[in-house]
Amino acid sequence: QVQLVESGGGLAQAGGSLRLSCAASGLAFRNYAMGWFRQGPGKEREFVAAISWSGRTTYADSVKGRFTISRDNAKNTVYLEMNSLKSDDTAVYYCGADRWVGVLRVGASYYEYWGRGTQVTASS
């Protein structure tokens, strides 16, 4: 049974930082690109960042230069370091797993497995 479990969410002041983690189990981690998405109140789920097994990354323009995605393949864990938080970053953040096809994909429909999400609130 595949499980993705996010942690590390919480409340931070605007300009502050948070680090999210997503622990994966039940899947061949090396066969999956891992992504972070978020869904704010009344909004669609949107792409944040993705990373391949080898460490190739891509980011949404809205977070480029502020957020960093990384993964520890030995621990089957992916991270999202969030700096310079803005109130617009407030959302539930989800971790997803996309079976590797050679490119990083930003569409949520490609992601096969999802975690339950962790709330991030950036207060101004």
Image (cartoon, rainbow, N blue to C red):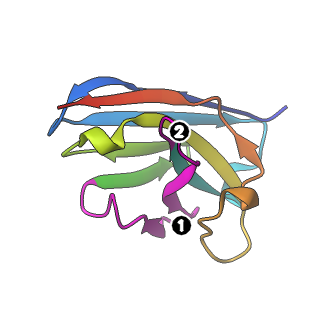
Q: Residue furthest right?
A: 1
Asked if residue 50 lies in the magenta stretch, the reply is yes
> Does the rendering let one see residue 76?
no
Residue 6 image position (x, y, % from top left): 54, 30
Residue 78 image position (x, y, % from top left): 51, 44
The image quadrant of residue 24 is top right
Quadrant assignment for the N terminus: top right
Q: Residues within 10 Å of mark 1 (few under 14, many from 20)?
A: few
Tag 1 residue: 54
Total tally of numbered discs in the picture: 2
Residue 92 image position (x, y, % from top left): 50, 33
Q: Residue at x 24, y 62 (%)?
A: 65
The image quadrant of residue 64 is bottom left
Q: Nearer the viewer, residue 25 or 103?
A: 103
Q: Secondary structure at mark 2?
A: loop
The prevailing secondary structure element of the residues shown in magenta is loop
> Does the rendering let one see residue 63?
yes
Three-letter amino acid code at the position of disc 2: Gly
Q: Residue at x 44, y 36 (%)?
A: 91
Q: Residues within 10 Å of mark 2 (few under 14, many from 20)?
A: few
Q: Residue at x 78, y 51 (%)?
A: 112
Tag 2 residue: 42
Three-letter amino acid code at the position of disc 1: Ser
Quadrant assignment for the C terminus: top left
Query: Disc 2 and disc 1: Cα gap in Å?
Result: 35 Å
Q: Residue furthest bottom?
A: 102
Asked if residue 91 lies in the magenta stretch, the reply is no
Q: Which residues are magenta?
A: 39-66
Q: Residue furthest front?
A: 42
